[in-house]
Image (tube, rainbow, N blue to C red):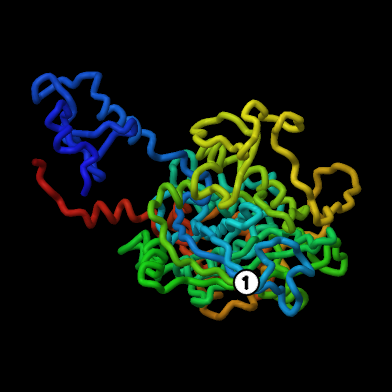
Amino acid sequence: MVDIVSEKESRTGQTNIENEDTLTTRQGHPVTNNQNIRTVGNRGPATLENYDFIEKISHFDREKVPERIVHARGAGAHGYFETYGTAGDDPVSKYTRAKVFQDKGKQTPVFVRFSTVVHGNHSPETVRDPRGFAVKFYTEDGNWDLVGNNLKIFFIRDAMKFPDMIHAFRPDPVTNIQDSQRFFDFCSNSPESFHMVTFVYSPWGIPANYRMMQGSGVNTYRWVNQEGEAVLVKYHWEPKQGIKNLTMKEAAEIQATNFNHATQDLYDAIEKGDYPEWELFVQVMSDEEHPELDFDPLDDTKLWPEDQFPWLPVGKMVLNKNPENYFTEVEQASFGTGVLVDGLDFSNDKMLQGRTFSYSDTQRYRVGANYLQLPINAAKKRVATNQEGGQLRYENDKAPGQNPHVNYEPSTLGGLQEAEQTGKEHTPKVQGQLVRESIERNDNTKQAGETYRQFKDWEKDELIGNMVGDLAECDQRIQDKMVALAEEADEEYGRRLREGLANAKKDGSSMNPLGNKDSEKAPEQAIKKGHEADPY
């Protein structure tokens, strides 16, 4: 280790020796005593000029940024995406000019964040909940964020309902305990949610870990080719490790010993070189209303049938590097559905339209106006903007040779210039009255019935058992609405749910994490099982 202050200098007026591993303050001052604050005598009181301590403790007080409203609990990893250069048997350029998908074998760096949705930053990873699956591609054209979930559909089809949905799913504002009656109250009055409820209350609602779950963009996007022609597209990540889900009992057994099991699984696998991989598939549909379908292709509560719209492989993703620091990389990683590159575009999917504002807006609130200057969020290419100021700005986004006095455009005095566009712009025709209406093709239960019939027997048993356990403690009106939706979806589904509720004991409470019947008895059990102790 080389001394920054030499021994000779230390003898000629220097009061400390600073090495490369010497602790300093954020001002660069060497810290000579990190064990004691400065006090009057060794018993105090303390003095106000304890600068080292004040800097240390005031930063500690602020070291947690506001928690994400949703997707607070997460894990992440670095890796790369390798394109096949094709979409099925066709060159991918037939559908999109996005550079990330061109040139077979080209690799693009990525960062992926997996998460649970409803609960807080240190909630168990065994909860019954969708899982977030967000991928940041650091492409040569700038960043692209593909922000989705493990399940391929969603609870609602209109962003207006999103805050209400999350409020209903999160803990009660009075008791601060998740309440299944609140969950089913919202869902029974939002029948478009029934397909998603069917998935969430089945074993698909508790993935075994992050490596062995699917991912999906959920919403419908557009791809645009060099000629400005567009198609509708859906994204699907398929894990090469296989897919594994848990029953309620299995999840409870795991949670009893480790509530970080999925984070640990991902970290350990990468550390030992067992790099997880996913293959990326797309479904492609012509950019039309498709009246021949019994669903609207922009409805995110619906699946596109694979037999009509085949999955086309376009590339694979490998995660091969763990974060060096959880906070700077995983916690500060910020994603947005509006972060698209040339050749990728929005559709009119109403949930996507609402998410596109909300996601980036929440990052500016949570991390700060300059969150895109943080290394985990910054594009891995040149950036030049006329943006100024804002909290924690530390870089000047100016181009080499740019006139520093010009922070506006247009200018003849050496400011930034617009890029030249070579690909034809996609200009969809929009016509109609401005209205507040739901989409017309809104069958809420057909696909839920199809999903139920595809479940294996044990998955059906788990679904019915979990739903009965929670619904049994709900208001009868809520039960009736949910049974009616199940009967509409599938005769067997409705019959089993109705019979299960008729035979269920109604001696508990709905104040349970979803699917955790009888968990309200835990406080009493803790008292009964607790061991007495004398005061000391």
- In the displayed structure, would residue 203 be above or below residue 167? below
Q: Residue at x 49, y 56 (%)?
A: 116
In terms of image quadrants, where is residue 282?
A: bottom right
Q: Residue at x 79, y 62 (%)?
A: 225
Type of amino acid under label 1: Gly
- In the displayed structure, would residue 251 be above or below residue 176? below
> Is residue 194 visible from the viewing direction of this image?
no
Q: Residue at x 76, y 76 (%)?
A: 90
State the residue in front, 524 or 505. Answer: 524
Q: Residue at x 26, y 44 (%)?
A: 20
Q: Is residue 360 left or right of residue 21?
A: right
> Is residue 445 visible from the viewing direction of this image?
yes
State the residue in front, 457 or 499. Answer: 457
Quarter placement of the C terminus: top left
Q: Indicate the position of residue 380 as horizontal and vertical percent values.
A: 56, 52
- In the displayed structure, would residue 173 be above or below residue 521? above
- In the displayed structure, would residue 115 be above or below residue 397? below
In terms of image quadrants, where is residue 234?
A: bottom right
- Which residue in the protein does label 1 denote? 315
In this view, the residue farthest toward the front is 8
Specify few, some or many for label 1: CA neighbours under 10 Å numbering under 14, 14-19, or 20 or more: many
Q: Indicate the position of residue 108 as horizontal and vertical percent values.
A: 58, 63
Q: Indicate the position of residue 390 as horizontal and vertical percent values.
A: 55, 30
Q: Is residue 297 left or right of residue 503?
A: right
State the residue in front, 394 or 415. Answer: 415
